[in-house]
Each structure stands twice: as structure tokens, then as C-alpha cells.
Amino acid sequence: LIFIDMADVSEGHPLFDLGAIYYISHGSTAENCMKHFHNPKERLVGLWVPFVREYFGAETPEQRAEIDEMLKPYTAFQMMIFLRNTACTHPLAEGFARELMQYM
């Protein structure tokens, strides 16, 4: 069960929160997954497939890849807010944010 709220971005669209979930499962370090989300990274990545299947109806790897691509601009926006609000300088977060900027 995953709850989606608008507390972080408050832009009125759930894709911003889904972008945050995408970042958590794909952009976080193994250490941060345990520290902040109390789950191993492998489990969080593993939850992505059934989540996308149930939420979007994406059954095939190609459909999941389309969803991933669709969420990247929202993930980039979420990362910019996170980096701004936390003054985060973690190389992985910065690198992931730079990689996602191509979708903006």
C-alpha cells in the first residue's frame, strides 16, 4: 500500500509524487534506502514493477520503460526542490539530477 500526497510539491498533480517514488527506487544509494526508508534498495527497486503494473496497468517491460520516461521530468523537478531545500551536495543526488535535467 503506497499513499500519495501532495505535501512536498503541492503542484496538484500526482506525477510529482510518483516522480519522488521513482527517485527513491532508482536514485537513492543503498545506504540512504536503509537510513531513510528502512528497506534495502533491492526491495524498493523490486516494488517498482508491481507498483507500475497496478497503478498504470503497465504489464510489459516496454510499457514500464515508457512510464519511467514519462516520470523523469517530474522526478527532475522533485530533485531540484529537494536539492534547493536541503542544500544537498551528495554526488549521487547531484548526478541523478543532472541526468534527469535533459527531460526538462
Image (tube, rainbow, N blue to C red):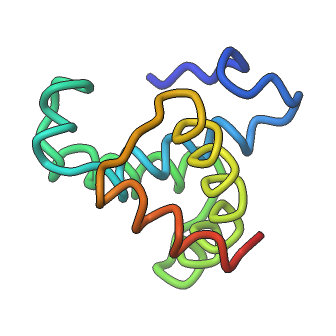
Nearer to the camera, 26 or 44: 26
**Residue at (40%, 52%) from the top-left corner?**
48
**Is residue 63 depicted above or below 12 in this figure?**
below
Query: Relative to 104, is 23 on the left or the right?
Result: left
Query: Relative to 61, is 8 on the left or the right?
Result: right
**Residue at (64%, 38%) from the top-left corner?**
81
Residue 75 at what x, y percent from top left? Answer: 61, 53
Q: Residue furthest right?
A: 12
**Is residue 80 depicted above or below 66 in this figure?**
above
Nearer to the camera, 49 or 74: 74
Query: Relative to 1, is 91 on the left or the right?
Result: left
Nearer to the camera, 21 or 27: 27
Residue 101 at what x, y percent from top left? Answer: 65, 71
Residue 102, located in which quarter of the rendered image?
Answer: bottom right
Nearer to the camera, 9 or 55: 9
Quarter in which the C terminus is drawn = bottom right
**Residue at (53%, 70%) from the top-left corner?**
98
**Residue at (27%, 44%) from the top-left corner?**
44
Quarter in which the N terminus is drawn = top left
**Is residue 48 depicted above or below 34 in this figure?**
below
Residue 36, located in which quarter of the rendered image?
Answer: top left
Residue 15 at what x, y percent from top left? Answer: 73, 45
Residue 78 at what x, y percent from top left? Answer: 63, 43
